[in-house]
Amino acid sequence: MATLASLFGGLFSVIVLITVAPPLSTVALAFGPQEYTVLAIFGLVTIVGVASDQPIKGVLSAALGLILASVGLDAFTGAQRFTFGQRELFDGVPLLPVLIGLFSVSQAFNLCVPRSAGVLTGKGPQLQGRNLPLWSDIKRCLRTLLRSSVIGSVVGILPGAGTSIASFISYNEARRHSSTPENFGKGELEGVAASESANNAVTGGTLIPTLTLGIPGNAVTAVFIGGLTIHGLIPGPSLFTQHAETTYTLILSLLLANVLFAILGLWLCRYLVIVTKVPGAVLGPMILVFSVIGTYALRNEMFDVWLVVAFGVVGYFMERWRYPAAPLVIALILGPILEVNFRRSMQISHWDLTTFFTRPLSLTLCALVVLALAYPLWSQWRRRNNQK
């Protein structure tokens, strides 16, 4: 069911990408520094508001990311900021070591501690019988698949959001609409279908702001933008006009990738499940070794290796103390976009903050920021009323 739901969500997001991206790319021509400033703020507000049950911890995590984003040479004056004389930090804190440290090395440390001595205890799962779910089960999950795919695509379009957020929202919505919510968390197929279709639907949605506005939806698309730029492909309307052949080939390759991974997933799942039997004490050091090798191979700098270990420790304690790592990473990505465009807006308007409210598109984005701030408060108020 997880594989079929992923296929459904992925194909749905490709359709959304083909439908929405070309017309949205023309809107990108109207984006100035004011719009990019508010868009970056919107991304930060969205990720902080949704990524954590405790918004204060999300705010603190995002604040740390913004501080890290200020490291490097000032884009306007060239002055050094928080580099401590380290030439490796002149271009800012490198993104990939931060990602590998927070999400990979931290998990390796977590697997190595005594309380996580093994991924599974006992013999581990034994796959028997049919691979595909019954048609009656698929039919029962169709509404959940469609709802979750829509949620995943919308969350993917939002700057800063990602697969984890889409999965949690879709899972909660599926449980809320289910006639048997008590089965969720015990292997309920609707829960599996909801989270898996949503996280794959994010992929197509994330590419919409990436290809049309140059705003990364997550860390992966930030790297993707760098790859496009290296080849002279600048995100925006030109991708769908001058470089249409390359762009639509990319979109079709995403379609093909979803089909191929579903075929391989259904064929190999019986064998891949064996990896869950590997003890954490073995799996953790393996992850750590490959993480260090991959980090060093990026720039051939030992500084990056120490950086990835340091962020691995930070990520371990953040997870242990329930501080979300996603706001930190997204703030690190959006921080430079926010700073450069805000300062550019202020130079254009002679430090008049009303410039963000005098442009229709910027004013619309400001309204979205207000809604994003108000939504958690409204949800909390509604939850309290339901409890009464």
Image: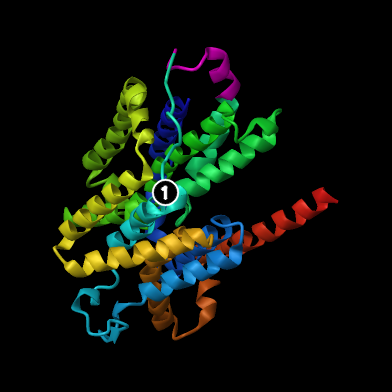
> Which image quadrant is residue 282 in?
top left
Residue at (72, 57) in percent of width and height: 380
Q: Residues within 10 Å of mark 1 (few under 14, many from 20)?
A: some
For the residue marked with disc 1, what is the amino acid? Leu
Q: Describe the element under mark 1 as helix, strand or loop.
A: helix
Between 30 and 386, the one nearer to me in the picture:
386
Furthest residue to the left?
300
Please indicate whether residue 4 sits to the left or right of residue 380 in the image: left
Please indicate whether residue 168 sits to the left or right of residue 332 in the image: right
Residue at (38, 66) in percent of width and height: 332
User: In this picture, is 387 found above or below 149?
Assistant: below
Between 63 and 306, the one nearer to me in the picture:
306
Between 237 and 160, the one nearer to me in the picture:
160
> Where are the magenta residues, as a range?
129-141
User: In this picture, is 287 found above or below 33?
Assistant: above
User: In this picture, is 42 found above or below 156?
Assistant: below
User: In this picture, is 128 found above or below 275?
Assistant: above
Q: Is residue 31 visible?
A: no
Question: Residue 277, position in %: x, y?
Answer: 37, 34
Residue 296 lies in the magenta stretch:
no
Question: Residue 100, position in %: x, y?
Answer: 31, 56
Q: Total of numbered circles in the picture?
A: 1
Please indicate whether residue 187 sits to the left or right of residue 326 in the image: right
Residue at (40, 52) in percent of width and height: 209
> Which image quadrant is residue 121 in?
top left
Q: Which residue is mark 1?
A: 24
Q: Is residue 175 visible?
A: yes
Question: Residue 85, position in %: x, y?
Answer: 22, 85
Question: Residue 25, position in %: x, y?
Answer: 37, 50
